[in-house]
Image (cartoon, rainbow, N blue to C red):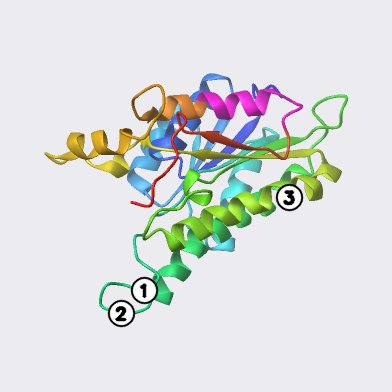
């Protein structure tokens, strides 16, 4: 699918993987909608790219609906949806003091990462369904969801995070089957260790990153956000890629810790 002349909505588009993706899609001629909680940064990115900012808590359906409406209001057909908003959390199922995992923190991670992905995917797909087909196959749009290799090999303390990302992986095939009727493809990317602001800029940040890189097979470094964006674009452009879960991790296989 050619994104030129279409609208694309990116959750978490104000930073990291989402920002890199928004920039790549804008370079290809898409009008991007940055759906993010960070109003200052989100507006700055949207303005720079000639796009639109929509302050969005993805766990809130009304806010997601407003963001999708903003994409429709651009006057360009909504063709691309990229779910990259998410939060992390570290907590053991039973901690060292013998206390169980906090159910509130578990629920929050599920609400943002999993339910948030579901909200944007389903609400945006309903809007895509109202567009005209983009090609002879009857294709109307593409959804790219972001999970994690933690969905497959969660480490100690990643119970909530892995459950949320595993749910995204689990949605891939049924969502693709559901949305086939309206000509929407669905794929999921599972990133490994990607160099984004989440790893910080403290004095020991580079030492910390070096430890993270140790299990990577090749190339022996963290992935880059622009490489993630290139993969998103490849999945959007390749019309036969559907219902797939793609590892993007340099061959890393997580150990327990």
Residue at image x 48%, y 56%?
A: 162
Q: Is residue 10 visible?
A: yes
x and y, in percent, of residue 155 in the image: 40, 53
State which tag comes first along the sequence, 1 or 3. Answer: 1
SS label for mark 3: helix
x and y, in percent, of residue 174 in the image: 75, 51
The residue singled out by tag 3 in the image is 175
x and y, in percent, of residue 183 in the image: 81, 38
Which residue is nearer to you in this view: 207 or 80? 207
Residue 235 is a magenta residue: yes
Q: Which numbered circle lies on residue 98?
A: 2
State which tag comes first along the sequence, 3 or 2. Answer: 2
Which residue is nearer to you in this view: 210 or 109? 210
Which residues are the magenta region? 230-241
Between marks 1 and 3 in the image, the one whose residue lies nearer the viewer: 1
Callouts 1 and 2 close, C-beta under 8 Å: yes
The answer to whether residue 228 is left or right of residue 15 is right
Asked where in the image residue 223 lies, by quadrant, the reply is: top left
CA gap, disc 1 and disc 2: 6 Å
Q: Which numbered circle lies on residue 94?
A: 1
Residue at image x 38%, y 74%?
A: 101
Which residue is nearer to you in this view: 6 or 236? 236
């Amino acid at each position: 699918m050619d994104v030129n002349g279409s609208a694309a909505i990116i959750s978490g588009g104000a930073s990291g993987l989402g920002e890199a993706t928004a920039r790549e899609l804008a370079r290809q001629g898409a009008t991007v909608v940055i759906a993010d909680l960070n109003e200052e940064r989100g507006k700055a990115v949207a303005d720079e790219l000639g796009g639109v900012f929509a302050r969005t808590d993805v766990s809130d359906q009304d806010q997601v609906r407003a963001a999708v409406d903003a994409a429709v209001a651009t006057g360009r057909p909504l063709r691309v949806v990229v779910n990259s908003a998410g939060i992390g959390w570290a907590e053991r199922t039973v901690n060292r003091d013998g206390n169980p995992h906090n159910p509130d923190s578990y629920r929050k991670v599920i609400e943002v990462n999993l339910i948030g992905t579901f909200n944007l995917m389903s609400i945006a797909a309903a809007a895509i369904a109202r567009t005209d087909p983009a090609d002879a196959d009857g294709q109307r749009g593409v959804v790219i969801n972001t999970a994690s290799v933690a969905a497959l090999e969660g480490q100690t303390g990643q119970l909530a995070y892995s459950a949320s990302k595993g749910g995204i992986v689990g949605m891939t095939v049924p969502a693709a089957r559901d949305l086939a009727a309206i000509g929407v493809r669905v794929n999921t990317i599972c990133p490994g260790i990607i160099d984004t602001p989440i790893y910080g800029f403290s004095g020991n940040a580079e030492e910390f990153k070096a430890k993270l890189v140790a299990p990577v097979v090749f190339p022996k470094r963290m992935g880059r956000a622009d490489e993630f964006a290139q993969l998103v674009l490849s999945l959007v452009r390749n019309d036969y890629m559907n219902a797939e879960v793609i590892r993007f991790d340099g061959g890393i296989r997580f150990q327990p810790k």
